[in-house]
Image: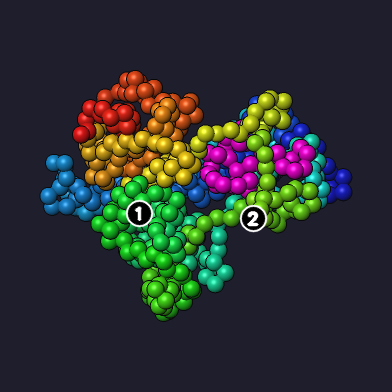
Amino acid sequence: MRDNMTEIRKCKVLIIGAGPGGYVAGIRAGQLGLDTVIVEGNKAGGVCLNVGCIPSKAIIHAAERFESLQKHSVKEGHMGLTVEGTAKLNMAELTNWKDGIVNKLTNGVDALLKNAGVEVIKGWARFTEAKRCIVNTDDGEITIEAENVIIATGSSHIDLPFMPCDEEFILSSSGALSLNKLPKSVAIVGGGYIGLELGCALTKLGSEVTIVEGTDNILSIMDKEIRRPLEIWLKKNKVTIHTNSLARGAEIKGKGASRKVNLIFDKNDENHTLKVDKILVTVGRRPNSKGWGIENMGIRMDASGNFIRIDRQCRTSAPGIYAIGDVAGEPMLAHKASAQGEMVAEIIAGKNREFDKIAIPAIVFTEPEIVSVGLDPEQAKNRGEHVIIGKFPLAANGRALTLEAEKTGGFVRVVARKDDHVILGIQAVGSHVAELSGEFILALEMGALLEDIADTVHAHPTMTESFHESVMKTLGHAIHSA
């Protein structure tokens, strides 16, 4: 047992949270020779690695495999391939496989932090002063004093007060990723990217899915044209969508194994009840900016009062205190947090850095996948830009045909400034388009002109040719499209 009265750990850098922002900041700080401590209450990797990005993509991939096996199992077969018998799903084994991937990655993060010389303290921190906190661990309390503090506390699932998640009948996204039995029917409250990603996967696995969304459209962060192929897929696969509908509550009915849950929601001023096996609540996330003593640190919040206010170096209003990732504002994306974490570690080490990104990619792993980098046509026009737009269908790309990616009705779209041909934005929708995002973001960050991409030889046959052709279309002379 530690002596609570005497043990004080002093360090150069204290990081609160070992998610994709915190652990990257820790590794980079360790590489730079800074005495670094990370305090983490759960497992390294944060929400993204443990109950978010990685496990959800594992489930999505497994659902794609299952759907493919079913195609080959039908009487006629597919692609000239037939599998005898019927594809079967063992949800518990699928969840175990997913957990194996997560464990491998979390152990890898632990090893990277150790190799970088970073001390990881398992526990929950509460700040009593700007650069002083008390950490409750299994072995007692530790007081930590730091020259620099990086707040990387991330975000949490938003619970509905009138319909709290019990992870049995009413699930958060975390609960949906830990199912041991596939529900026959699922109601998803919230038609954003999290709900739609999981909804597509559950549909492929065999669940009957209904989506209840409060606004006019599902996936409203994307423009109408780019989300249209997704809407077509959902309709084709008999996913029921209720827009302009507000959840009002839930009631558990029945006894024993026959118990179901009723979702109560309003639509068109009428009350509706939907009986399902599970309700999945995906109405967004909130920053973890409360409950750990932020009020004792002299830090200013933004106008909403939820996010920590930062500058382009992620500095807060308190000297020597930085905030990164979800807790520091939109977009709440893992790759933004990682980029900020690496930058802040280098700033503390004396390097001249600032977070000045042209664009941060947004990717939705639905069926089909959706990628957006930079400005879409409407956003560009709202900023007063005079633009030219080119769109190339995946149906005209040889590699897309061999992957059956064209069946989603996908395309790549480029938005460029009319007078100087600077690329302002790139969007794509279709199977496998997420892997094109690296080229898209690189083009924007390097200030590429349409001619730069047009003059770059793209390998054949690859999906990247679709980007090349969309640029050529923007210039008015695509080769493989009228």
Q: Secondary structure at mark 1?
A: helix
The answer to whether residue 238 is above or below residue 44 is: below
Q: Position of residue 472 (x, y in %)?
A: 30, 28
Query: Which mark is drawn over residue 200?
Result: 1
Q: Can residue 451 be seen in the rendering of this structure?
A: yes
SS state under label 2: loop
Query: 464 or 301, which is in the foreground?
Result: 301
Mark 1 Cα-neighbour bin, 10 Å: few <14, some 14–19, many ≥20:
many
Front residue (pair 365, 219)? 219
Which label was assigned to residue 110? none
Residue range of the region highlighted in magenta in the rendering: 314-342
The one nearer the camera, 316 or 43, is 316
Q: Position of residue 126 (x, y in %)?
A: 75, 52
Residue pushed farthest right?
5
Callout 1, which amino acid?
Cys
Task: Decide whether residue 318 is among the magenta residues.
Answer: yes
Which circle's residue, 1 or 2, is located before the other in the chain? 1
* Place of residue 179 in the rendered image (x, y in percent of width and height, measured from the top left): 43, 58
